[in-house]
Amino acid sequence: MTGVLRPNGKGDNYVQDDLLTYNKSKSNAFGFAAYSDFTFLRDFKLTLNVNVYDTENRSMTGASPDYGYNGSTGGYLSTYSYRTYSVNTQQLLNWSRSFGKHSLYLLFGHEYTRDYDGTLGAAKHNIVNYAANKELAGAVTMLSTDGYSSTYNVEGYFFRANYDYDSRYFASFSYRRDGSSRFDPDYRWGNFWSLGGAWIINKERWFPKNNWIDELKLKASYGEQGNDNIGDFRYIDFYNISSVGGEAALDFSAKGKNDITWEKNGNFNAGIDFTLFNHRLSGSVEYYHRKTTDMLLWVTTPTSIGYSGYYDNVGDMVNKGIELSLNGDVIRTRNVTWSLDLNLSHNKNEVTYMPAENKTAQSDGYYGYSSSYNFIGEGLPLYTWYIPKYAGVDSQGRSTWYVKNTDGTESTTYDYSKASYYVCDDANPDVYGGFGTSLKVYDFDLSCSFIYSLGGKGLDYGYMSLMGSPTSSSERGNLHKDLYNVWSADNTSSDIPRFQYMDEGSSYVSDRFLTNSSSLTLKNVSLGYTLPKDWIKPLGLTSVRVYCSADNVYYWTKRKGYDPRSAINGLVQASNTFQPIRSISGGITVKF
């Protein structure tokens, strides 16, 4: 037994405290969009676009000086403001002409985006009159003040050309040059291009004439895109301005790297689009090979050198696989239509190259570096788990883990600090996609859609937290029903560690908590009824449909409460993440 008091907030009345707490927010938003078209010299058109968006938010919080957690500090008042401002401008020059069987389209453009965001906040203690004045001026002891602003600029120049011959042969080419303020001026600009083509083969004279092929298109393309999504000013060192003895001082905050630049993604795609049986069956099959060079990833460093890590272009990665899409009418009559659709993707991910300076660790024959619970190494998929391996329980019911010995053998230990780290499974699914069906019978329609994912392993943090033994800091909390089967003197065959006070090793991170991430989600169900036209024609209406719909209806996974959809990297923290909200709605759609 660990007592009857809760571990936190002993003696506090959270319900009453919540009633006395003051929270107020005000928000203002402004948006503006405009464009102009100028046509000249017959085939030219100049388009000017501008979009501006501004939002401001101010929040105020107050806590009573007479009761609750802040009673000992004379109460608490804070104010916080946040503003974002974004402007985007485009200048587009279009030229197009058709001559005979040839069609040509050209586009020249320039685009500029500027994003600004800033905050300002302050907090005080010792409120003079909480009931009458909840503004910041109503308290006398300054607790904190802080604020920052950040600006992000990106600019691009681009060109695109499309060519079509006789609606049989298609070709396209594009080029753009982009500059981002997230990189040092010497590494700010990147060049990106694409080239593609398509051939509707069934329009050729030599193609066999038949009644079951409506369209058969061959297509292929290659293109490069850039990624700068790492946050602002990662190329310079960060410092906090603090006070030491009343004088300003700089406090080192984060490490920058001046030579980071654009991450580039080169995509090759080749496939077939088809429509068959008088448009009753359509779909596509496509192979892709996507190579990412100069990957922008966080590199972890020993904190003893003064910082925990930095962003760097750490190497190359390849994603390759196939995508399949099918849509078909199983039944198609005058009054009944039943359709099915399916899509799936199979992807293989692998880090193919890392520079020598980033190969700071070696594990199980792979070279790279560790980052949190992952190992980023050549020959491995991204999001490969790097954690201790669980070795079961010992004769006393304690958790044990494997240890790599210097002579190449393995042993086990119940001391977690001595456990070795292993390259384990990865979080990437083997196959993912969706499927659905729709049925229309006379004026009634019903549809439903599913999404699915097969394979991959996730670290189930929620389950791990529910399987721990009580400690001095967590005496009371929810427990998982699997603890009914823990190891005991009467249940020595169990692989679940003993449930014993202060036995923290019962829920340490290891491959014991890696869980199959396969999932199936009933994404949407919709039912509708379209009123007969004879009923609504006298009202001057062309269509009236009454419907109800449900979204995010249900999902199935390996364990109840485990939702791998919430984390692409497989780190599933069920205790503080929200699943997609289930919603039910209905309405009437009217067309005139």
Image (cartoon, rainbow, N blue to C red):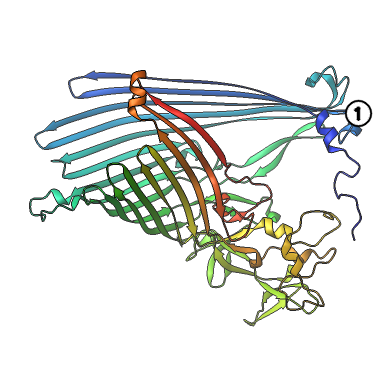
Residue drawn 84% across and 55% down? 475
Expressed as whole percent of the image width and height from the top left, the position of residue 228 reads: 48, 42
Expressed as whole percent of the image width and height from the top left, the position of residue 576 reads: 67, 47
Q: Which of 214 and 346 is in front in this view?
A: 214
Number of labelled discs? 1
Q: In which quarter of the image is residue 464?
A: bottom right
Above or below, comparing residue 463 to residue 42 in the picture:
below
Residue drawn 20% across and 44% down? 170
Decide if residue 587 is on the left or right side of residue 571. left
Expressed as whole percent of the image width and height from the top left, the position of residue 50 reads: 41, 22
Residue 260 in view of the camera? no
Decide if residue 582 is on the left or right side of residue 350. right
Expressed as whole percent of the image width and height from the top left, the position of residue 471 reads: 84, 59
Q: In which quarter of the image is the N terminus?
A: bottom right
> Which amino acid type corresponds to the residue marked 1 in the rendered image?
Asp
Question: Quick one: SS at disc 1?
Answer: loop
Decide if residue 342 is on the left or right side of residue 65. left
Q: Which of 327 and 289 is in front in this view?
A: 327
Residue 460 in view of the camera? yes
Above or below, comparing residue 5 to residue 178 in the picture:
below
Q: In which quarter of the image is the C terminus?
A: top left
Within 10 Å of disc 1 (Cα), the crowding (few <14, some 14-19, many 20+) is: some
Residue drawn 16% across and 51% down? 201
Residue drawn 51% across and 24% down? 53
Q: Mark 1 points at which residue?
A: 66
